[in-house]
Amino acid sequence: MAAIIFSKDFGGNIAIIGQLPQGEFKEEGVPTGIGFDVNGMYYPVKELGFGLNLGGSTYGYSERKIPFNYYTDLVTITEKTSNNIAHGHVFFRIMPFQGNIIPYFEGLIGLKNLSTTTELVNESCDDNDATEYDDCQIAESTNASDIALSYGMGSGLEIKLYALGYDDSDMEDNLIGDLSFFVNGRYLWGREAKYLKDEENSIVFTNPQDGPVETTFNWSESKTDLLQISIGVSINFSL
């Protein structure tokens, strides 16, 4: 009986992503998110790969100056609020054609986490002068967090830029991998989640002159479909 020989091919990439809300998520007024995405892959054969995908984006950000305490407005601090989507998937990738330009197709399943966080920062702390960010941050709190099932499919194109070898020789048996540029598009369906959209529409504060400030959250709830566009670089190598 013939033995099955698996390859020792691995790969990884990093990309800048844009996440465009679709369907109900778009109708709720959620803006486009910008972030990053990383993927690690194993190829048992050259035409098929399995991998792990992690990443995240920020789809809303605001900040305001507020008094340091209730008794005086002579000292202020900065309140920063950000809305984020983190994601993680396992996926498979099919690459039916091999060459310097490689098209591929993939399927993914995993989770999305939608969260809103607020932090208070020392206003006198200049990012250029600060040695430790903790010296600038006064406090931080998560205002909202919800998880939704995420699944989808995508396609992309890898263009090989440079062959990697043990030395400057371009002999085939000396090559250990290659560096590529890629573009990728994924449609990620998402189950319903509860989230905040932005400070202007979702977070309402009472007037400080009326007493201690109270905050009201206007929650949104919908499916969380996204169209994700990625541009980045990848490295594939054989051990």
Image: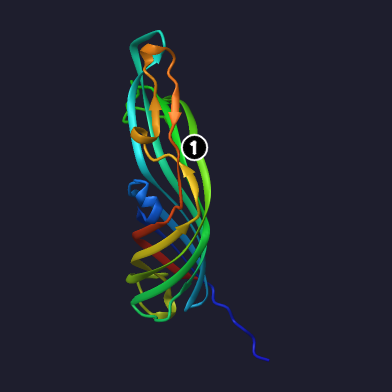
Report x, y in % for residue 230: 35, 59
Q: Residue at point 44% right, 14% down?
A: 212
Q: Residue 13: horizontal and vertical position, in percent?
A: 41, 61
* Viewer-side residue, 2 vs 77: 77
Q: Is residue 239 visible?
A: no
- Amino acid on which the number 1 mark rests in the picture: Ala
- Identify the residue at horizontal 39%, vertical 15% (top origin): 68
In the displayed structure, 33 sits above or below 108; it is above
Q: Is residue 120 left or right of residue 150?
A: left
Name the colouring of the figure.
Answer: rainbow
Residue 6 visible:
yes
Residue 79 position, x and y percent, is 38, 26
Q: Is residue 100 above or below residue 146?
A: below
Give the quarter of the image for residue 63.
Answer: top left
Name the residue located 40 percent from the left edge and 31 percent from the top edge.
203
The residue at which mark 1 appears reads as: 144
**Is 29 placed above or below 177 here?**
above
Split into 4 quadrants, where in the image is the N terminus?
A: bottom right
Q: Position of residue 26 (x, y in %)?
A: 35, 51
Q: Residue extending furthest right? A: 1
> With respect to residue 194, does 125 lie above or below?
above
Observer-nearest residue: 28 or 165? 28
Residue 225: quarter of image: bottom left
For the image, the number of numbered tags is 1
Of residue 12 and residue 171, the one placed in the foreground of this image is 12
Most distant residue in the bottom direction: 1
Q: Residues within 10 Å of mark 1 (few under 14, many from 20)?
A: some
Tag 1 secondary structure:
strand
